[in-house]
Image: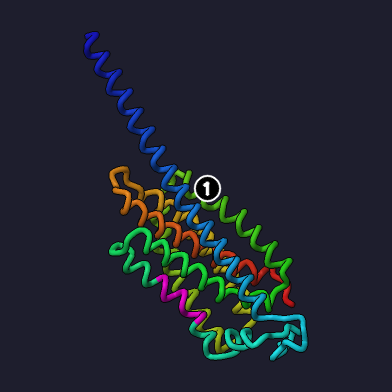
Amino acid sequence: MADLRNYNARAAAAGTRADAAIDEGLRAYMIKVYNLMALGLAITGLAALGTVSLATTSDPSAAVATLGNGNMLTQFGTVIYGSPLRWLIMLAPLGFVFFLSFRVHKMSVSAAQTTFWAFAALMGISLSSIFLVYTTASIVQTFFITAASFGALSLWGYTTKRDLSGMGSFLFMGLIGLIIAMVVNIFLASPALQFAISGIGVLIFAGLTAYDTQQIKEMYFEGDGTAVAGRKAIMGALRLYLDFINLFMFLLQFLGNRE
């Protein structure tokens, strides 16, 4: 009887140590995901600021063109904002997302990470035009509101015991409908439809933030090798990065003060 009690005690202790090891590995994995996402956002911000500083000027003698809101563009600014190159700049980040999604399993961790950094930089160049539309103060304010909202939603997605997989298909269908509405509104230019798109977009990406966080958490497997775990972390960071950027852009349409 004593041997049985000792065996049960040893088994319980071994199970506790195993659970502790899994929890420690999961925490390290999620921290890596968040660090990669945060660094990607930092690269995007720096690229956006660098691009807009090169594209605009306060010196009339150096200006090549003037926008309706008074912003003066340099030669570089007219190329990236006023030439057909702007379409390449807008679509290039999307190409990087597809490339990384389909090729990440065949890439080394360093190559996948470099691709993610390049994507983040291109996204920064693409988003730099918001500084020509909205005031810097409102962009900064919206960024911190987005960060606080994202943090709360992601924390809930990580800690909740509720299975969020059921809302994934619903959110995906909503996202498809949102994209269609955005394409239609390019031709309609309806302020009312744009307002509705912004509101629905905030709700969809708020839900996706919690859903993706839970999915990324469940992707963790203690037995993964270093390369597999590294690729999973990069793809997790990409998903959360896209959630953050889209949530920020839709909130900016609500909260941003235009120039």
Q: Residues within 10 Å of mark 1 (few under 14, many from 20)?
A: some
Percent position of residue 172, x then y: 42, 67
Q: Residue at x 54, y 52 (%)?
A: 153
Q: Is residue 20 left or right of residue 131?
A: left
Magenta stretch contains residue 71:
no
User: Quadrant of the rendered structure where residue 47 is?
Assistant: bottom right
* Towards the viewer: 91 or 47: 47
**Residue at 65% over, 58% down:** 145
Q: Is residue 188 left or right of residue 169?
A: right
Viewer-proximal residue among 205 and 99: 99
Above or below, 165 relative to 250? above
Q: Residue furthest top?
A: 2
Name the amino acid, label 1.
Leu
Regarding mark 1 in the picture, which secondary structure is present there? helix
Residue 228 in percent (x, y) is at 31, 53
Q: Is residue 189 left or right of residue 109?
A: right
Residue 94 within the magenta-colored segment of the rendering: yes
Q: What percent of the width, then of the height, locates residue 157?
A: 48, 50
Residue 203 sits in which quadrant?
Answer: bottom right
Residue visible at 52% across and 58% down? Answer: 39
Looking at this view, name the residue that lies furthest to the front.
61
Task: Tell me the magenta residue range.
Answer: 89-97
Q: How many numbered discs?
A: 1
The residue at which mark 1 appears reads as 155
In which quadrant of the rendered image does the C terminus lie? bottom right
Q: Main secondary structure of the magenta part?
A: helix
User: Which residue: 40% across, 53% down?
Assistant: 216
Residue 156 image position (x, y, % from top left) = 51, 48
Q: Is residue 181 above or below residue 209?
A: below
| 211 up-or-down from 187: above or below | above
